[in-house]
Image (cartoon, grey):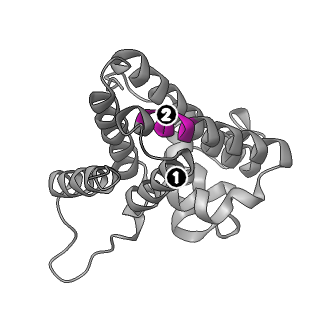
Amino acid sequence: MSTRTDAPTRREQILKEAARLFAERGFHGVGVDEIGAAVGISGPGLYRHFAGKDAMLAELLVGISERLLSGGRLRVRESASDPGALLAALIDGHIDFALDDRPLITLHDRELDRLRDADRKLVRQLQRQYAELWVTAVRSLHPEVPEAEARAAVHAVFGLLNSTPRLGSREGGPPTRAAMESLLRRLAHGAFGSLARP
């Protein structure tokens, strides 16, 4: 995915702060006034951008699912002829998400059930489509692997990569971004490499 160079819109600023606050204190632990204060506008001023907290939560969780899927599809178009390069590109894209959007992972884990049924179903549908891109890439690289095993491996790697919010500041602090990126890449490739039959 290309890196944006333009400044975030007010709406994007609100969503970023809402994600951070929801992840830190839980959806019900954050008021509209606090989100507004974090971006320098009054709580009631937020209603010019969103109908309420529920709308912010839906846009955050549906939005990241849409971005992951569109980024995955772009990688498929760019690398479809080389299964190894495609899987590497999918891994790198997901690592960027896992390191740069940790609050969204926490939010998904804790608050997905708070979405309206239609939004929750949409998130699940988008996630299934995203996972299938990975399953297809894995089976292209390892055609001898049964589909069920490839799918299980993909979800195991998602669990590994999406563990980044749990990297708390312990003694010595968490690894640098570059070190964590390198570690996650090696672990993901190692997991998929273990599928190869002798």
Q: Is the magenta stretch mostly helix, strand or loop?
A: helix
Q: In this view, does 89 lie above or below 189?
A: above
Q: Does the magenta stretch include residue 132?
A: yes
Q: Does the magenta stretch include residue 190?
A: no
Q: Are there few (<14), some (14-19), or many (20+) residues within 10 Å of tag 2? A: some
Pick the residue in front: 96 or 173.
Answer: 96
State the mark number for residue 3.
none
Residue 20 showing in the rendered view: no
Residue 102, x across and y down, in percent: 43, 55
Q: Quadrant of the N terminus?
A: top left
Find the magenta span and give its range: 130-137
Count of picture labels: 2
**Helix, strand or loop for disc 2:** helix
Residue 63, x across and y down, in percent: 60, 36
State the mark number for residue 104.
1
Amino acid under label 1?
Leu
Quarter of image, res 170: bottom left
Image point (50%, 53%), residue name? 149
Amino acid under label 2?
Thr
- CB atoms of marks 1 and 2 within 8 Å: no
State the mark number for residue 136.
2
Q: Is residue 146 above or below residue 69?
A: below
